[in-house]
Amino acid sequence: MTSSLDILFVDIKKNLEIDLDDREEVSAIQNIISDNKHFYVLANKKEQRLGYYLFNVDLNNPDV
């Protein structure tokens, strides 16, 4: 589930929920895209600093 304010990774098979915006300290989320192995997040703020921030999450191992 995502919005411009929050990114939650939820795996109901593993009973896992990760609040990615808190973990990565990002806000002002602009876009999220995915492929078969990762999804990619573009945000405009990280640790309250304005800029362009891109990070990816491995769908098979999102805790890393």
Image: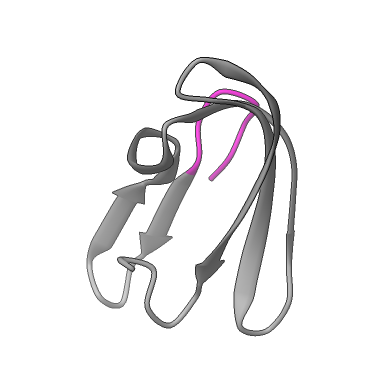
Q: Is residue 32 left or right of residue 45?
A: right
Tell me which secondary structure the magenta stretch mostly adopts.
loop
Q: Where is 44 relative to 55, above or below?
A: above
Magenta stretch encompasses residue 3: yes
Q: Nearer the viewer, residue 22 or 47?
A: 47
Q: Where is 10 relative to 3, above or below?
A: below
Q: Nearer the viewer, residue 48 or 39?
A: 48
Q: Position of residue 23 (x, y in %)?
A: 34, 42
Q: Residue furthest left?
A: 15
Q: Nearer the viewer, residue 36 or 52?
A: 52
Q: Residue at x 30, y 66 (%)?
A: 63
Q: Is residue 49 left or right of residue 62?
A: right
Q: Position of residue 40 (x, y in %)?
A: 67, 59
Q: Where is 63 relative to 4, above or below?
A: below
What count of labels does the image hold? 0
Q: Is residue 60 left or right of residue 44?
A: left
Q: Which residues are magenta?
A: 1-7
Q: Residue at x 31, y 77 (%)?
A: 13
Q: Residue at x 36, y 34 (%)?
A: 22
Magenta stretch encompasses residue 31: no
The image quarter containing residue 24 is top left
Q: Position of residue 17 (x, y in %)?
A: 29, 54
Q: From the image, which quarter does the C terminus lie in? A: bottom left
The image quarter containing residue 28 is top right
Colour mapping:
one colour
Q: Where is 39 relative to 14, above or below?
A: above
Q: Position of residue 31 (x, y in %)?
A: 77, 42
